[in-house]
Amino acid sequence: MNGGCLGVAGTAKNTGKTTTLAAILREAAAARAVVGVTSIGYDGEDLDHITGLPKPRLLVTAGTLVATAEPALAGRPEFELLERTPVRTALGRVSVARVARPARAILAGPAGAAGLGTVLDLLRRNGADLVLVDGAFGRLAPMTAVDGLLIATGAARRPEAAFLAREAAAITRLCSLPEMPGKGRKHLVRVRGPASSLTLPYPALLDLGWAEEVARRARAAGGFPTEIYLPGPVGAAPLERLGQGLSGVGSVMLVFSHPLHLLAGGDALAVSFALDGLESAGHRLAVRQGLRLLGLTVNPYYPAREGGTYRAAQLDAAELLASVRAAVDVPVTDVVLEGSRVLWDRIWGRAGEAGYS
Amino acid sequence: MGRRKVLLAPLDPVHDVGLKLVQRALDAAGHSTLRLPPDLSAEEIVSRAIEYEPDTVLVGRTLGYNVPEVLARLVDLMEAAGMRSRVRLGVGGMAIRPELAAELGYDRGFGPGASSEEALAFVEGREPQPPAAPQALEKPDLTAGYGYLAKDREVAASLEAIAAAAVAWGKARTSPGVERARLRRRILEAEAGAERSDGRISEPVDELRAAYVRACDPPIRAFYEGTGPPGKTRPLSADEIAALAAAADPVSFERRQVRHVRARPRVFVQYGTGCPVMDSVHNRVAEAWGADGLVHFDPSWAARTEGLIEGHHSHEEDGTLLTLANLRSIGRARLSGTLWQVRAHRGLNTPETVVLAAAAGADLTKVNPVYGSLGAGTDPERLVVDGGECLSLAAAAGLPLDVVTNEELCGVPAGKAFAGMLIIAAMAVHQGGRPILQPLFCLSPDVMVTGRMEDNFVDYNMAKVIALRQLYDAPIWPGAPIGFLTHTEDRVQSATSTALHAAIAASLEVDAITIASADEAYSGGSIAAASRVDTLLATAEAFRFFGSARVAPTPRAEEWAGELVAQIKDTLRQVLERPSLVDALYAGVLGSPADGVYPGRAGRGTVRLR
């Protein structure tokens, strides 16, 4: 815990991010670690903005560092303001504060990776042993700034254990793509051939037309390409179209910028299926920057929509846990069922395996 | 600031009206805009954003099932595409709140009521221009531009004769109420260390107060002698006084506007919960929702008791006690442009009430000895003397006053009530005052009996204003509240009725109106702040709906106005035939037991010649 940063993201809203974060906060406090905490969205409110159902509270102990929008600190003597940041949110400027006495926190932090990087540096500089980043909705992309990631999934994503298990497998598969750092890769598509390289003006692969264009230009670039670097978000349909365009060109190394950019479209299953197709065609897959996925948490709770309102509903917790656990090779925890200590031990066990401490 | 490139994306199957309005404002400000068609996916919008390279992306979307996830995915895709750090993202829609925008990852959320200026400011990276300085409103003079001349020769002559005689009659007499008012004024001058207004040296406050107490009824004497406050009242605690002081702290809120395109009528609300702290908070709420003025209601029992107590006090039933401390605190807790009226129209303490109102900084008062004696229980002789003093004090303090006609609610026909109102207005003018006529917009007993509102509520209410304007050049402030006796316990009905009566008032371009809260008629206790907002919102909606258009009455309005004029003239003639105004009041000329009113008894036999 030497200033490392752990993100807690979710596959959807209400999948258990706050519960997971609260559990880690409890265990970190027990371990007497100085924790810094922020969010890429907004968390800590009494009632969910969308469903109106109660939300778990975020309790922070004395000494914890909090980076949140200033209105969330205003009139709160439990928080001692340390530093203002240039990072702004929809609720106001983000500031770093130290918790003077146990309090309930409202987190509203930087929405993007750039702002998050600034805030993480400040939390570390103010003495955080461990920095926790709370996710928001199913947003994953800003989590490229963290060192290790926990992903919360659950019935709020879809109240169907078999689907959640399949999707968890797809997520872990994408997150375990081999890392292949490369200095020459920029934020544009780059095609490397045996003799030369070609840069194409596409910072993402979201459009079928772009996919066809990349494949066409790759083929026309002089000989068979050996590597195609695909920056930014990549959707399943353009990947399939790219695969079609590359048929007959031999084995190409397809390098994606980050696993989370493959997940940004919100359909891990479809992207994983498209990657299967590319691998079947003999292409190889890698990411420029890898991701340390420290585990998954599962949450059987979901808000069930009834007419214009919501009620709390639940899948069978044990069945969900067993289904997801059987589908993936990373630790899977139901925090409510198994307790925060189990989660804590699994995170650090996994972090050790991943060579990260 | 240079020209900005803005991509407007309606992430919605159909709706893009909000974005069209924003685009118009952006184009007018010289920015470059591209509005995408509705029903594109998040991926398609990001693709277009990559091509267009905007500085700002504004997304419009009404929330629905799964929509927050789609909005969040757009942000995620922008982040993954490396655009997030150089493109500012805003989202607007009816269900958008700043917290939700933050959670979704947007830089700004534009919820209901957001203006194009706010979106423009966001694009330009500046703070939005505040809406027309609501905190520094200029206080209007409701009486400006009126000449106070009777337009009918007979009416002019009648009013002049009656008013001059009544003023002279009153000045030749005095009452405990008049004496206490004079003592109170001297107490205030002495406490302030100021010279007496008559240039004489101030007396010791203790002696003045002792004289004051001698002129009070036993419950009030007991208060000053230390036995305790009158029943159902108690002093405010130190915490409550601190809270009352805090209510006057400057507050920053976005003030709504009730009026739309017309400058008139100014909209007054009534308060008087019994608790000065709650009054102050309610008044702030009313101001935030656009009230132009506040009317203080005091307890009815206090009007039947000689003398007023001092200090900060709470009353456990409706009506907030008239003390200088209460009034000053409540008066401080209002915006600089908010008009404030303290009523002095009935009871045994009316002259002192005007003294306190002026000392506390009130802008207006309310006087009508005719209603106060026939409809509110005070002896006519006493109230004509006290009322005359009120008019004199109000003129000296520069306080305009409305002349209320609530005796119509007791059953007095409007024509008779208006004759009384015009007499008091003429008495006020005779003493240099600035009266405001206050006809009721109401479903009065007389109207019910005569069936004048069986078809609609428009004609007879309009007829009243038409008639008054035919006779007298004075400001008009229908009240109080408008729609009296049309309200039910149903808040929607009640607010709607108020709003429709307000629309009539706006059509007539009267100077002010007083509106009820939506639960006022049937609250059975304290009025809820939310019900105050109901009627303010409903009234604003009516003003917005009609704008410069007018409510058109049927020809019956003119016909009834003619009848009212005749009734007023006839009543004035009958008053002239009596030896004095007081005699006319006792004789029922301005309202009789047959109509439903009786001369009041409070303070009977207390008047003496000077």
Image (cartoon, rainbow, N blue to C red):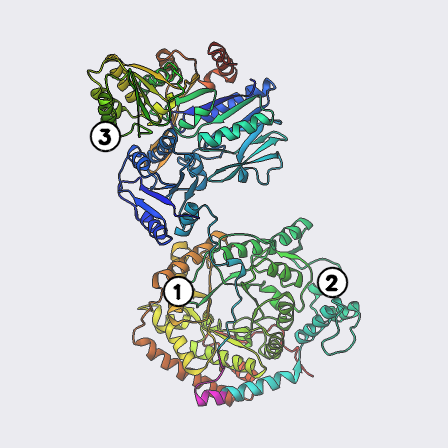
Answer whether residue B490 is visible to the viewer in this image.
Answer: no
Residue B526, image x, y percentages: 53, 54
Type of amino acid at the residue the image marks with label 1: Val
The numbered dot on residue A73 is none
Q: Is circle 3 on the same chain as circle 1?
A: no
Tag 1, which secondary structure? loop
Classify mark 3: helix, strand or loop: helix
The tag on residue B261 is 1
Q: How crowded is mark 3: few (under 14 residues within 10 Å), some or many (20 or more)?
A: few
**Disc 2 and disc 1 in contact, CB within 8 angstroms:** no
Q: Nearer the viewer, residue A309 or B451?
A: A309
Labels 2 and 1 share a subunit:
yes
Give the chain of mark 3.
Answer: A
Label 3 or label 1, whichever lies nearer to me, is: 3
| Residue carrying label 3 | A209
Residue A86, image x and y in percent? 52, 37
- Magenta-drawn stretch contains B148: yes
- Subunit of mark 1? B
The residue that label 2 is drawn on is B224
Q: In which quarter of the image is residue B345?
A: bottom right
In the rendered image, is residue A302 in sight?
yes
Among numbered discs 2 and 1, the one appearing first in the sequence: 2
Q: Where is A60 relative to B536, above or below?
A: above
Mark 2 neighbour class, 10 Å CA radius: few under 14, some 14 to 19, many 20 or more: some
How many discs appear? 3
Which residues are drawn in magenta?
A: B146-158
